[in-house]
Amino acid sequence: MVERTVRIGSTHGLHARPAKLFTQAAAASGASVTIRKGGGAPVNAASILAVIAQGIDHGDEVTITVDGGDEHAVLDQLVELLSTDHDE
Amino acid sequence: MMEITGTGIGQGVAVGRVVRMADRLPDPVDRPSHLDPERETERAKGSLSVVAAELARRGAQAGGAAKDVLEAQAMMAEDPSVVDEITKLLATGKTAERAVYEAFAAYRDLLASMGGYMGERAADLDDISQRVVAHLLKLPAPGVPDPGHPFVLVARDLAPADTAMLDLDQVLGLVTVDGGPTSHTAILAREKSIVAVVGAADAATLADGDTVIVDAANDLVIAQPTPEQVADAEARIAERAALEAAPVTPGALADGTPVPLLANLGSADGAAEALKLGAEGVGLFRTEFLFLDADTAPSVREQQEHYTRLLAAFAGRKVVVRVLDAGADKPLSFLNDAPEENPALGLRGIRALRHSEVILREQLTALAAADAATDAELWVMAPMIATVEETRYFTALAKELGIRVAGVMVETPSAALVADRVLAATDFASIGTNDLTQYTMAADRLLGTVAKLQDPWHPAVLRLISEVGAAGAELGKPVGICGEAAADPLLAVVLVGLGATSLSMSPSALADVRASLARFGQDDAKALARAALAAEGAAEAKQAAQAAASEISTTRAAAS
């Protein structure tokens, strides 16, 4: 299992389109992925409802964990997604 | 061929296939399932995936921003957290319908409590939940349908939320089983120029896929039309499209007599749209919205800002503002909160304002200040005038507070019958045909059961309008029309024949009325008016005017 903490790059946070892109990528990775905001409880990153219900805003720090499959590659890809601004 | 009658909104015609709007489903009952949880889980997952695929398909078809929204909805339909929750609920012996409903409701409540963007997604979850439950029950999906091709929407009636969602590129026409000409649906259809027939009770028998002609001009829906009828309707659609594409010119009769065409507006927000559609000014600006939902009257400054915004949009043009028209039928707590047995006959309009004169004084002061700050030509009028004495009172007060042109609305038979004396005491008159019809026919305009009597074509109503028109001509004072009657293209010609000097209407009606006026000269308009006045009832008056109009067209065609 690998984990990394990243700051959200999207202007409007992890809502709408960015949340959809992130959840799609997490689900497609084949690995078991969780996301947690600050010191909160981790939730299934493949669940768009669980992700948007975290109320993650621009600049918030979130921690991603990836378990199984090509862990490092998946983690790199997801971190890249989260730190990009998709709301331009 | 089958004809279904209703009330047509506007003058349009549409041909298309019927898609019925399903009613909203009731919440599934919480009862033990007679299937085992594994079987219920299969059912739930099957329906979830069908709905997700359908949403994704619609997204791919829509493209753009809608694609992202619908794809996100598709993901929510198969969200692993929801599926886990549903599986847990099913293990306790619930039905798939109930488990789906409860699982989505739990997330809906969570998101709703977060407000903002998340709150908006709550409504999406309701929609997804309804779709899945409908699929489980083998029922059509609720809400405004989206068959993926243009269609005629047939519904019992539409909720405001549904009408807001209508895709005007897809909805060719609208038919409702319930609802009258003043229903929410009718108002929206008029505003958005949707071809609509409302209150068509027999439309309940129409089935998905039926081809129908929605003929709003003739208050008809034709089911199983003949090929000739379809060809005729398509010719009319093409003719109207050409009309709308025609350049916007000032309103005038065929002989060049100008008849300014003005807009009825309820707030300054509609100004740009009205100008685009060719409004030459505003014939009725309602000020009630500034006062509604208020415990106290808005300040002079607040009012002045709004009036200035309105007048600035119509620089160099005429804007007729009606002072606050409130009463027990449109109650405002600070004006009159005493319940009345007969609100339409109670302390309303100028009567209520006189009772609370400070509100009237403040409104006139704000209007005069806005007029001084802008280049529009401001006229101000008082509603619900019944006597010459009230006319004098309002005109004097308005002038005292700096209003340059003050007039009155003619909405009561009494004001119409003594119109010569009313007009002698003020600058202009504007006839509110909705109220004038209600009071002449003694038929409540909000009551569906007497809706048939609420017809401005009635010769009694036309006779009163002719009194006002004659008095205006005699004294050289303007007589405008600012009710729904002015939006009826043929009646508009009759009204001009009766002496109306300007017509004010919903901006969406301007093009039809402009085209209709251009077909008739002043003598023609008078001939139409005479024919209508001599009829015995509303329907006969309309027929007589139609006959006179087609005779004029035929004679003219033969001569050319």
Image (cartoon, rainbow, N blue to C red):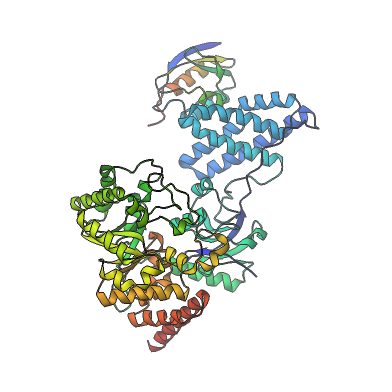
Q: In the picture provided, is B364 more to the left or to the right than B215?
A: left
Q: Which residue does the image show at 56% across and 60% down from the upper left?
A: B448
> Could you say which quadrant of the image residue B199 lies in?
bottom right
Q: Quadrant of the image for the C terminus of chain B?
A: bottom left
Whole-percent x and y of residue B480? 33, 67
Q: Which residue does the image show at 74% across and 24% down from the upper left?
A: B91
Q: In the picture provided, is B336 more to the left or to the right than B442?
A: left
Residue B464 seen in the figure: yes
Vertical arrangement, residue B31 with respect to residue B471, above or below: above
Residue B280 seen in the figure: no
Q: Which residue does the image show at 46% across and 19% down from the upper left?
A: A79
Whole-percent x and y of residue B126? 58, 36
Q: In the picture provided, is B402 more to the left or to the right than B273?
A: left
Q: Nearer the viewer, residue B528 or B65?
A: B528
Whole-percent x and y of residue B168? 48, 53
Vertical arrangement, residue B108 with respect to residue B8, above or below: above
Vertical arrangement, residue B453 with respect to residue B166, above or below: below
Q: Nearer the viewer, residue B331 or B2?
A: B331
Q: Quadrant of the image for the N terminus of chain B?
A: bottom right
Whole-percent x and y of residue B219? 54, 67
Q: Which of A50 and B258 is in front in this view?
A: B258
Q: Which of A81 and B88 is in front in this view?
A: B88
> Could you say which quadrant of the image residue B377 lies in?
bottom left
Tell which residue pokes out farthest to the bottom in this image: B559
Q: Which residue does the image show at 66% across and 32% down from the upper left?
A: B100
